[in-house]
Image (tube, rainbow, N blue to C red):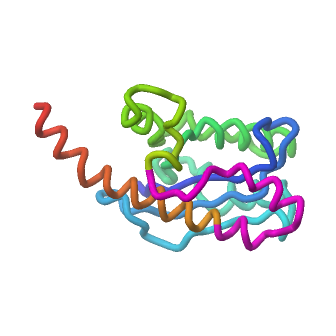
Amino acid sequence: MPNFYLDIETTGLDPKTSKIVTIQYQELERNTGRANGKLVILKEWKSSEKGIVKKFVEESGVRAAYPFAFIPVGYNLGFEHNFLKAKAEKYKLQALDILSRPFIDLRSIGILMNNGEFKGSGLDKISNKPSNGSKIPEWYENEEYDKIVDYIEREAEAFIELNAKLYQELPKLREKLL
């Protein structure tokens, strides 16, 4: 039952009008939340949006018959879900619904860490992630793909660091609460 860090970068917030420019995923150790494999970055500029969505579906195991073959772990997975579902429909690929199977979304923990407030609970506010993704569309438009890749690598590192800390600290909290 492998867990996988999952994230995408896009040119905007609307799945109908914005483009997925990258899909990235990385296997995580199930009991520690640490990286257990290489970060895979599927790049639209090397293929096409349809190409990276199709490759993700074919190579990740996200559509495997066994629902625990690919367990997405991310931050605000509803965003990825909405985009991936819309793009699978657009390109007439097999339906893709990452939230109908097992998943782990750390967004709720981020909100609780922010005193129950949604505003100010972004991953960049509760981890070592250096910034939000607001520059991605500009970098994409200017073909500054190296900046996008650097951002993705730093974001993945920050997420996995936070995830591993939560795996370490939350069981201690559980003991305190019981």
User: Of residues 92 and 15, which is closer to you in this image?
Assistant: 15
Where is residue 85? Give x, y as percent.
72, 38
**Residue at position x 16%, y 46% from top?**
172
**Residue at position x 85%, y 35% from top?**
16
Total tally of numbered discs in the picture: 0
Give the left or right position of residue 141, taking residue 154 as reference: right
Does 111 appear in magenta? no
Q: In what quadrant of the picture does the N terminus appear?
A: bottom left
Q: Is residue 177 above or below residue 167?
A: above
**Residue at position x 68%, y 54% from top?**
57
Question: Image quadrant of residue 42?
Answer: bottom right
Where is residue 52? Give x, y as percent.
77, 60
Tell which residue pokes out farthest to the top in this image.
116
Q: Is residue 139 above or below residue 174?
A: below
Q: In what quadrant of the picture does the C terminus appear?
A: top left
User: Of residues 147 and 70, which is closer to you in this image?
Assistant: 147
Give the left or right position of residue 173, taking residue 36 as reference: left
Where is residue 135? Give x, y as percent.
74, 54
User: Of residues 53 and 128, which is closer to you in this image?
Assistant: 128
User: Of residues 55 and 25, which is closer to you in this image?
Assistant: 25
Q: Is residue 170 above or below residue 55?
A: above
Magenta part of the chain: 127-150
**Residue at position x 32%, y 50% from top?**
166
Where is residue 44? Give x, y as percent.
81, 62
Does 139 appear in magenta? yes
